[in-house]
Image: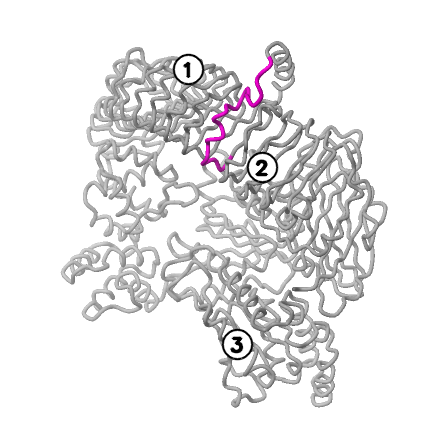
Amino acid sequence: MAPTHLSEASSSTPKSKYEVFLSFRGEDTRKNFTDHLYAALIRAGVNTFRDDNELSRGKDISSELLKAIQESKISIVVFSKGYAYSRWCLNELVKIIECRNAIGQIVIPIFYDVEPSDVRKQTGSYAKAFAKHEERFEADTQMIKRWRTALSDAADLSGWDLQNVANGHESKFIQKIVEDVLRKINRVYLHVATHPVALEFRVEKVMELLSMGSDHVHIVGIYGMGGIGKTTIAKAVYNSICDGFDGSSFLSDVKDISKKTNGLASIQQQLLSDILNLKSIRIHNVDRGINFIRERLCHRRVLIVVDDVDDSTQLNSLVGDRNWFGVGSRIIVTTRDERLLTELEVDRRHKVKELHYEESLQLFSWHAFRRPNPKDGYLQLSKSVVDHVQGLPLALEVLGSHLFKRSQHEWESVVEKLRHIPHNEIQKKLRISFDTLDDQVKAIFLDIACFFIGMDKEYVMKILDGCGFFPVIGVSVLLERSLITIYQSDQTLKMHDLLRDMGREIVREESPNHIGKRSRLWFHEDVVNVLKTHKGTEAVEGLSLDASACREDVIVSSTEALAKMINLRLLKINFVRFTNMSYEKFSKELRWLCWHRCPLKVLPLNLDLDNLAVLDMRFSNIKKVWKETKFLHKLKILDLSYSIYLVKTPNLAGLSNLERLEFEGCTSLIKVHQSIGLLERLVILNLAECNNLRELPDSICNVKSLETLNLSGCSKLNRLPEHLGKLEGLRKLLANGSAIKQLPISLGLLKNLEELLLVGCKEQLTTKSLSSSFSRWVSPRSAGFSTLLPATFSRLSSLTNLNLGHRNLSDDDISIDFGCFQFLKSLGLDGNKFCRPPVGISSLSRLLELGLNDCTNLQSIPELPPNLQVFLAKRCTSISRYPNLFNIGAKIVHLAITNCLETVDTWDLRHLAHSTTLLRWSRSQKGGFMPKPKHLEACIPAREVPGWFNYKEMGSSVLFRVPTLSTGETRAMIVCVVYSIKDEHNGSIDEYLTIHFKNKTKVYETFDGSFDDICDSKIGQDHTWLCYITARGFVSLKWDEGDEVEVLVEAHCGILVKQCGVHLPNIRHE
């Protein structure tokens, strides 16, 4: 994947001129196999280079051909019997391998009627060819050595052998190759830029600084002014080389994210998640995160981009030392502050300069005309714009987009205006786009620039709608003109720093010398000054003060400070308290009141909330929201989360347009007012962690608009309303950790319910079990009647995610036919008391994950679903019969069975060696390593390594020499580890294994690790962990015939390794 030709007008992937370069010997395959392969690639839409100019070939490869190799994403090398006779082909191959090593080009070897071992070792026809070469080029031994090395390196790569695929049928063989190519070229990369003009040279500069051929850890800094293109270059470089590393992570917007609460720790969490696929990891402390990074990545070759850094603490917490990362790792840092690069002691640094004039004109033209040069009649106007922009890419893009499809008269007006703006005031130049907006869209832009960057889009839209700004069209216009962006992952609003600063500068210019006469106040010192001196005026529309960073609450002498701000729409006063109660001084125009840590016990009657769209009072001292019913018909969001003194929800009758109601973490809440049933527009009701709430009013069933009901953590809530089924719009019912004992019969009416989470509280199970037994003895239930699940439960036909874990469910409780849940993808039944799994599970063709952990009465598992990928049945101590799990292994890739009644030493696992299963399930992994491709990973109650394993030893390592591979076969590996838990170990979530694969002959080492939920710390006897590494994974070990190698198992926490074994299955391709 060469980083060249990035100037093409596409950018989600690193663009190459060709997707595939074909290397072949014309005399052998030009008119047959290679011609058919080329035609198939072209039909599949693959841009393929094939050199047809055979007659012009001389002694050396032409510069055009070398360039074609370098500019191709993939090289396919067709090794035929006569390939090695061609000096031309061998030189081509040397260049191809150089591109693979230098820029991560993908190389696919094809063995066409030739043995891979002949290519690797230069035997057979290849030996005869080299005999001639050595005779002819006796004086150039280095060239001969390069050819041999290139052939060996290429033959070591994962490729295709005609004799071992599709029984030698060329048409099927070619089809499989084309499918493989399509998979590789369709990989998703970072979006770089819509029109990546002039990136080629800049990317090449950074690539040179990275020294990709070195095994040392290199840190390269990219620095320059804001908007100059640092991030764009970093993304392009990342896309070009990310495939060549064990793991990679692009950490965007480090400066902004690190300033949020626990922000730096969240970035550490993203880094680990990206590289290690540890989706479940949670980092709440920066120092702990540093240790995680240092310990988990020290053996991994990683690529990390730390984007937009402005403080050394950020770097020290993310990439503080080269020793944190494995050999060959590359770190790229982008910043405006060159001093930070000095403090980090980067190896090399690159200053991004402004675009040259021609480049600026081209980039501007792409945005203004959708072509690389100006339209007729617009050249001089375009040059005038480019002159003023002075090579700043962001300004070129924004102004170009602004002028797109404008008349010449409009262009002349814009150019004339530009002439009056000083050259050094780049931010002001961006204001030209702002000036073309209508007044409402301008107001939206300024509100976002001053208050809402990084906030949830829908939350902000409600506020802006309350202001009468028509945000649906307004935000759409801002997106079209590249003035804002929206993060797709979390739907938060984003604005480039230059644009944000431009917006804030516009506000400052409203009244440079009188702060209180500006429309928006956000700068901490300015706001405090205005409030303390009472200098606010009717000009102020928005005010934001967050005193959470201060040691003490900001004390404002009087609410009189707000009295003159009669047009105040937006008010954020987190951690602020007033010394008097004259809340009638608050503006009657408020649309947004955000008052976290509000000290009031009740909202005063003289506080006018009539125009509010969003009332955000999280973490407040409120005990009672208001004394009398409030009629707030414009209110869309009411958020009182974590108001721990709130006992009852307010009368909601007057909130007719409320859409979102948040009471999460209100631990004193005991009652939800029955008026909630009047909220005809409510979509989200969040009562999570309200652990004193005992019941919901029946009136809630009238809220047919409700889509999400979150009751998780409501540990005293023991029933749901009888007519819950009337909530016809409900999609998510989340009640983990609640005390609900029986679901209402009407539940079956919830035809749109997709997610139902009802995990019980583990600590309640013992008490519940005793009471349930007594209840059944006193009043036996009829067959088929469930304490928790009603008979109508089977009607929930839309379910995709169901978790009934730790609910003490018996066989009678789950007697319904689970086969009716045909859309179910995940089913959790951990910690229940049934003896048999639910009927119908085996027919769930879409079910991918099944959890039966801690089902201690479960006696057998007769049959599993056909497409199941993850099966967890740890600590099921009564199991005596299993299905043939590994026959199902065509799909299962993750299996954990521990502490069952019988061992499975007698299981014949040898057919694993012939499995064609591929790892399709992405799960978290301990030990700091991206898992190697596997057919299976399992933990089972076996006490010894099977006798049919090739190599086994007592202890934690196996040492052996790699045996000879038979003709026409590839090799995979099964690793088996028998382990126990140390007596003194008290259980930990961190039990895991690290596997070291050491090649002592080549002095090369690579690693793998167990998944995070596979090893069980609560086993009573010895168990076995095993994994089956695919042939592709085996290739990554770089083990060749005759190499002395060692498999070393490193145990962590309480694990004690007793025995380990290795089996090397030889695989024939069908």
Question: Residue flagged by tag 3: what amino acid is it?
Answer: His
* Residue beneath disc 2: 841
Picture residue at 70% right of the left edge, 40% below the top? 992
Front residue of 840/339: it is 840
Magenta residues (range): 780-801
* Residue beneath disc 1: 646
Residue 289 seen in the figure: yes
Picture residue at 66% right of the left edge, 52% below the top? 935
Q: Residue furthest top?
A: 778
> Which quadrant holds the C terminus?
bottom right
Within 10 Å of disc 3 (Cα), the crowding (few <14, some 14-19, many 20+) is some
The correct choice, above or below, for 413 with respect to 1041 in the image is: above
Label annotation for residue 572: none
Q: How many marks?
A: 3
**3 and 2 marks in contact (CB < 8 Å):** no
Residue 528 seen in the figure: no
* Residue beneath disc 3: 36
